Image (cartoon, rainbow, N blue to C red):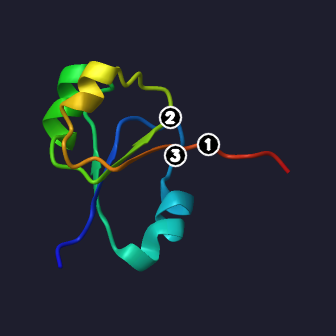
Amino acid sequence: MSRPIIAVTDSPFPTLDPAMAALKRIDPEVRMAKSASADDILAFAHDADAILVTYAKLTGDLIGQLPRCRAIGREIRGFA
């Protein structure tokens, strides 16, 4: 079975370690966008199984062009 592909649209955080630790058991291929523009997101996420977003805007039209995408999650961090 091939590794799931997770596309990260944008992240203000210095590291994705907390998110990657949570996803460790599925051993995903993680891709980072060059920018949060719709064209860049489509180019790198066209075959992604999931998208991890912080601030990027994903329109219905853009999501409709991602046939393999089964999940869209928002990366946030809480405060203690």
The reply to whether dot 1 and dot 2 touch (C-beta < 8 Å) is yes
Please state which amino acid type lies under the numbered disc 2. Answer: Thr
Please state which amino acid type lies under the numbered disc 3. Answer: Pro
Instruction: Inspect this view and state whether residue 71 appears.
Output: yes
- Label 3 packing within 10 angstroms: few (<14), some (14-19), many (20+): few
Residue shown at 41%/35% (left/top)? 10
Residue 38 place in picture, x, y as percent:
25, 21
Residue 9 place in picture, x, y as percent:
35, 36
Q: Which residue is mark 3?
A: 14
Residue closer to the observer: 65 or 43: 65
Task: State how far apart marks 1 and 3 are (Cα).
Answer: 13 Å
Residue 54 is marked as 2
Residue 44 is left or right of residue 54, and the answer is left
Residue 48 is left or right of residue 12, and the answer is left
The reply to whether dot 3 and dot 2 touch (C-beta < 8 Å) is no
- Label 2 packing within 10 angstroms: few (<14), some (14-19), many (20+): some
Task: State how far apart marks 1 and 2 are (Cα).
Answer: 7 Å
Q: Which residue is mark 1?
A: 76
- Dot 1 or dot 3, earlier in sequence: 3
Task: State how far apart marks 3 and 2 are (Cα).
Answer: 13 Å
Residue closer to the observer: 60 or 77: 60
Residue shown at 21%/38% (left/top)? 66
Residue shown at 67%/46% (left/top)? 77
Image quarter hosting the N terminus: bottom left
Please state which amino acid type lies under the numbered disc 1. Answer: Ile
Residue 17 place in picture, x, y as percent:
51, 61
Residue 74 is left or right of residue 57, and the answer is right
Q: In the image, is residue 5 above or below residue 56?
A: below
Residue 80 is left or right of residue 42, and the answer is right
Q: Nearest to the eye among marks 3 and 2: give it.
A: 2
